[in-house]
Image: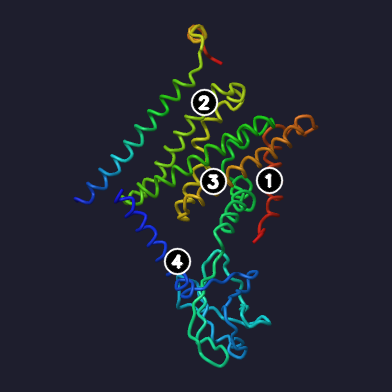
């Protein structure tokens, strides 16, 4: 009874403390947002003097890791209420990075209020969406990186096999990427064993492939027979190893790892399905004898790769 | 040298534990999802030359 009372009091006082601290924390570092890739918008919360705001030398802008490299502010615009300022830059900004904006000696109604710092970065959802879209379309593993071609050409003859493979592949990819993230973060990094990551990741993938192999044999024998040797070949697939390695290199968190793996898996499934659609049509079309079979498939894959170039530079946020 | 030993041992223990857990899980899955195969198929196949 006594401990529960103590716990409630402690948690209540902690919440009160956090509530009391929150405005102070908000005051110390403000937040800004990107406005396209050449402008940053910051909000002061109080009306500021136009003469002060129009002077670009009052703002120091830099990427967070290098405070010494200042970016040249081209011009500053103030909104009619004089609360929001938009900083224009000559060079395009790197939207993936975090920028800091120091507003020096802010003048409000003729008085100097002080200096305020703003941090500008994309929100978590925007970053995740970018990762998903990037892995799925923009840098599709099959069509722009030419990875995982073995399964891609092996299983893309029939649509239903391609869909089955896509689903199996995505499942294995997502599970193993999360497991690899956990192993890398909690075992490999703390014990300085990162040099073992390739062998550990392949082992982890093999475990999941074995599990899927066992289950598919019972659950869907038809698909199991159609996938044949390519099911176990998932283990040695380049994409399924590339994703955990890139997660490790980019120090992605658990959610980012999951998103990246999902994007890569769905991207591979899309590639397989598209290819299967074309190859089913090729079966009944008249192909010159020298191109029959795999050669024409390679040409189709090349055309798809050209088409997927159209996604480069795609940015929704 | 001491540091090297701790690193090696930590890695060995962690991955041995991971391997044992996953091995047990896979063994359980194999039992749970076992597919009955007629032993005659294997016996007949053993008698054939198997060139193809």
The relative height of residue A210 versus residue A307 in the rendered view (above or below) is above
Q: Are marks 4 and 2 on the same chain?
A: yes
Kindly indicate whether the residue at mark 1 contacts the one at mark 4 (C-beta within 8 angstroms). Answer: no
Q: Earlier in the sequence, mark 3 or mark 1?
A: 3
Where is residue B19? Give x, y as percent.
36, 34
Tag 1 secondary structure: helix
Q: Earlier in the sequence, mark 4 or mark 1?
A: 4
Mark toward the viewer: 4 or 2 = 4
- How many numbered marks appear? 4
Tag 3 secondary structure: helix
Q: Residue A261 shows which numbered tag?
A: 3
Gap in angstroms between the C-alphas marked 4 and 3: 38 Å
Gap in angstroms between the C-alphas marked 4 and 2: 51 Å
Mark toward the viewer: 3 or 1 = 3
Q: Which residue corresponds to mark 1?
A: A302
Tag 2 secondary structure: helix
Mark toward the viewer: 2 or 1 = 2
The relative height of residue B48 versus residue A113 in the rendered view (above or below) is above
Q: Colour mode? A: rainbow
Q: Residue at x 54, y 82 (%)?
A: A59
Where is residue A163? Give x, y as percent.
65, 34
Q: Which residue corresponds to mark 2?
A: A215
Q: Which residue corresponds to mark 4?
A: A19
């Amino acid at each position: 009874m006594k401990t529960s009372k103590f716990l409630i009091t402690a948690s209540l006082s902690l919440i009160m403390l956090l509530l009391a601290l929150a405005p102070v924390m908000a005051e110390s570092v403000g937040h800004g947002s990107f406005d396209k890739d050449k402008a940053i918008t910051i909000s002061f919360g109080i009306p500021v003097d136009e003469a002060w705001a129009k002077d670009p030398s009052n703002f120091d802008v830099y990427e967070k890791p290098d405070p010494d490299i200042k970016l040249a502010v081209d011009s500053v615009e103030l909104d009619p209420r004089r609360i929001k300022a938009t900083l224009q830059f000559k060079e395009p900004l790197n939207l993936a990075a975090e920028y800091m904006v120091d507003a020096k000696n802010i003048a409000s109604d003729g008085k100097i209020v002080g200096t305020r710092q703003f941090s500008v970065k994309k929100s978590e959802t925007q970053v995740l969406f970018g990762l998903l879209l990037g892995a799925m379309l923009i840098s599709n593993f099959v069509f722009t990186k030419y990875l995982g071609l073995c399964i891609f050409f092996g299983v893309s003859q029939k649509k239903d096999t391609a869909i089955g493979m896509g689903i199996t592949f995505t499942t294995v990819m997502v599970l193993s990427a999360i497991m690899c993230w956990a192993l890398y973060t909690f075992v490999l990094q703390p014990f300085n064993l990162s040099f073992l990551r390739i062998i550990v990741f392949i082992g982890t993938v093999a475990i999941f492939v074995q599990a899927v192999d066992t289950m598919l044999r019972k659950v869907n024998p038809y698909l199991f027979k159609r996938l044949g040797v390519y099911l176990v070949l998932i283990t040695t697939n380049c994409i399924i190893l590339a994703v955990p390695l890139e997660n490790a290199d980019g120090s992605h968190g658990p959610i980012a790892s999951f998103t990246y793996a999902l994007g890569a898996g769905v991207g591979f499934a899309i590639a397989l399905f598209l290819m299967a659609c074309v190859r089913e049509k090729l079966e009944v079309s008249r192909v010159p004898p020298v191109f029959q079979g795999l050669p024409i498939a390679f040409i189709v894959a090349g055309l798809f790769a050209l088409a997927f170039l159209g996604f480069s530079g795609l940015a929704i946020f | 040298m001491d540091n090297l030993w701790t690193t090696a041992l930590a890695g060995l223990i962690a991955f041995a534990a991971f391997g044992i857990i996953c091995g047990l899980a896979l063994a359980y899955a194999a039992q749970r999802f076992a597919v009955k195969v007629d032993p005659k198929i294997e016996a007949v196949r053993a008698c054939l030359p198997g060139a193809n």
